[in-house]
Image: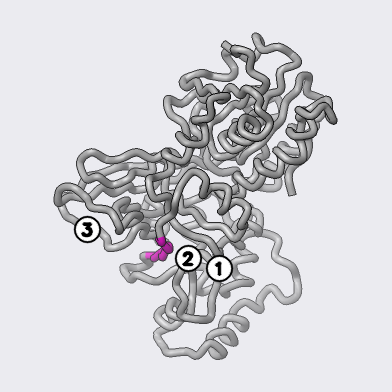
Amino acid sequence: MLNGADLLIVGAGFYGATLAERVAAKLRRRVLVIDRRPHIGGNAYTEIDPATGAEVHRYGPHLFHTSNKEVWDYLHAFTRFTSYRHRAFSSYRDQVYSLPINLATICQFFGRRLSPDQARAMIAEQASELGNRPPANLEEKAISLVGRPLYEAFIKGYTAKQWQTDPRELPPQIITRLPVRYTFEDGYFNDRFQGQPLDGYTAIFEKMLAHPLIETRLGVDFFDIKELLPKELPVVYTGAIDRYFDYAEGDLGWRTIDIEFEHIDTPDYQGTAIMNFADESVPYTRIVEFRHFNPEREFSGDGTLIGREFSRFARRGDEPYYPIDTRADQRIFQRYQARAHHEAGNIHFGGRLGTYRYLDMHQAIGAALKAFETIFVPYFDGQSETVSMRSRPS
């Protein structure tokens, strides 16, 4: 099966595909990429819906944004980007508000026109309940950013549905992904570079993995072949780290998503790509209407495709999407780190699942580029005896 491969990569998502491409293109080494799914691209996999012509994000919407020029320039070898800039909205008590929370959101929610200084002063007063104490969890961090009224309207219920966890049990850093603005700027991301890949996400992976020194095999489960691998073969593992060790230290908390797809006989269902539903009484977290990610395209037919997202805890056998990363999870992960440090063989843990770390697409690519330079170049140049990464990335 290995056909003289110099490196085995488990997982054909952004981390694995980036490393495969760099090792093949720059170091001229043979790389075998395997994935137990029937397709490349990991959770970023997309395909065209034949009924509408819309590009369907099968595992939930992916929106590319970064301020990392190295990552942006690297991806331009495999795709061009559209000028798409994401704008999001939230439905709360049958009213629609702009996200992220900005001056328009604040004025509308409190029913009055406020200047930036007035809004900032009002929110500062509402956020003062923490005093000088640093936020200890997501709820406290959110209150410190937007005050309790806005937190309870737009964040509390949505977060409880999204993470299936009390916000007081979630780490504060999760909510720092949500910007707060005291202007009417309603673009969701602040990053310098933004857009959607012109030909879709799957096309990026097809080009990354097209190098003649890369072989890709799909429908192959790493654990079916693990014991057959030569001990000296370097392996990049991008799956869930608790699964790798057969859950010996306990199950890490993961969140997964179920998407209920529906074709609707209208050319435009909700007027935007993503509508959040902040009310906890609404069972789904958001509705995605895929055609709005590519307004530059021509679509067939008069219908549209939507996806209702339902978030829940991942069980064994589910596709884990996001680490929940509670304090209990952090303790379990530390035990897996210790096991990784003493693991026999030449194994490198990477990606969101392998490092139990919330990584956006650009962060996964950036981490892979860094690992290539600091770990794989020295290894294949004979300056290091191992490709192992035993610590959580910063």
Q: Which residue is mark 3?
A: 268
Q: Is residue 39 left or right of residue 53?
A: right
User: Left or right of 305: which side holds 249?
Assistant: right
Q: How far across and down, in percent of the image, does residue 166 sit?
A: 57, 53
Where is residue 223? Give x, y as percent: 59, 17
Closer-to-camera residue (360/65) = 65
Q: Quadrant of residue 38?
A: top left
Labelled pair 2, 3 in contact (Cβ < 8 Å): no
Span highlighted in magenta in the image: 83-90
Q: Residues under labels 2 and 1: Cα distance? A: 8 Å
Q: Amino acid at mark 1?
A: Pro
Q: Circles 2 and 1: CB distance less than 8 Å? A: yes
Q: Against 281, is 141 above or below?
A: below
**Does dot 1 land on a helix, a strand or a loop?**
loop
The residues tagged by marks 2 and 3 sit, at their Cα atoms, a distance apart of: 21 Å
Please tell me which residue is depicted at 54% across the width and 76% down the height of the picture.
181
> 236 above or below 367?
above
Q: Position of residue 81 (x, y in %)?
A: 44, 54
Please indicate whether residue 63 sits to the left or right of residue 118 in the image.
Answer: left
Q: Which residue is mark 2?
A: 188
Residue corresponding to mark 1: 179
Q: Amino acid at mark 3?
A: Asp
Which element carries disc 3, helix, strand or loop? Answer: loop
Q: Earlier in the sequence, mark 2 or mark 1?
A: 1
Kind of residue sitting beneath label 2: Tyr
